[in-house]
Amino acid sequence: MEQLAKTNILGVGITPTSYDEVVRLCDHWLASRNTRRALRGSERPGGRTRYIAVTSVHGIITSVLDPSVRRCINRADVATPDGMPVVWALRSFGCRAQERVYGPTLTLALCAMAEKRGHSIFLYGSRPETLDSLNDNLLLQYPNLRIAGSFSPPFRPLTEGESAEILQRITDSGAAFVFVGLSTPKQELWMAAHAPQLDGMILVGVGAAFDFHAGNLRQAPRWMQRSGLEWLFRLLAEPRRLWRRYLLVTPLFLPLWCLQRLGILQFWRRFAFDEPRPRMVKSAGL
């Protein structure tokens, strides 16, 4: 259970999975980490750091347009389908029972597991006041959850010294999970860049989950989420920040998905360390 298979959606490897399966996989990774630590007789966890990309239509189209983002998502251990259009695309390629694996819900599922197993978490991203509210709200829901630390990075690139300092702070916290709330594609780029420098942790890019669980933003009603209209709810809630995403970027998904499904536009099959490039073909299929 070290790795889950992925399905090619526009050259991006998306993992057909569920909340329960992701939680079980993380539990397995952390159990293996603790076994290695016991065998080594070391307090350091050991093992490579894993990362999970919660991937929406925005993430997929950004990957189509930017190979560096595509590489980061394709190198993720898991890329969950966060958004009904991604779910529908997976179903159209044979994953008939696929359901959404949504960042805010996955965050809570992993916090519940962390509380049960005694694992600690670290919160990276957003604003200081948001992290304070998030910390309080998580502890209200999970009183025994160990929050090992949090950090709100400045809204500018970090210097090498600042980056090294925060990585050391995360390492010293001993956290099992690092929840990264920087929005796409910043969080995917951050996780891919820094996973090799962190020891045996699980990084999870959760997007707007921090703002939702801190009480800063309302989540779309369930009927809008199920019908693929969450984008409209979020656009109306944050028009100045999100209009480009929802009016210029994500509308590209439907025609490209249809072309891939018809076999007119085919995307490279391999994910891990390749740069998938679209190419026109006459034959159908992936």
Image (cartoon, helix red, strand yellow):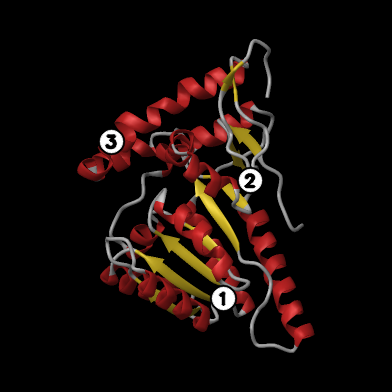
> Which residue is tagged 2?
273
Cα distance in 3D space between marks 1 and 2 = 35 Å
**Tag 3: Cα neighbours inside 10 Å, few (<14), some, or many (≥20)?**
few
Q: Residue at x 33, y 37 (%)?
A: 245
**10 to the left or right of 117:** left
Q: Earlier in the sequence, mark 3 or mark 2?
A: 3
Is any part of residue 164 visible from this angle?
A: yes
Q: Residue at x 68, y 24 (%)?
A: 286
**75 to the left or right of 248:** right
Cα distance in 3D space between marks 3 and 1 = 38 Å
Count of marks, rendered view: 3
Q: Earlier in the sequence, mark 3 or mark 1?
A: 1
> Which residue is tagged 1?
115
| Figure quadrant of residue 196 | bottom right
Q: Which amino acid, mark 3?
A: Arg
Contact between labelled residues 2 and 1, with CB atoms less than 8 Å apart: no
Q: Which amino acid, mark 2?
A: Phe
Kindly report which numbered mark, 3 or 1, lies closer to the viewer in this rendering.
Answer: 3
Q: Which amino acid, mark 1?
A: Glu
Task: Give x and y (percent) for residue 102.
Answer: 50, 49
For the N terminus, which image quadrant? bottom right
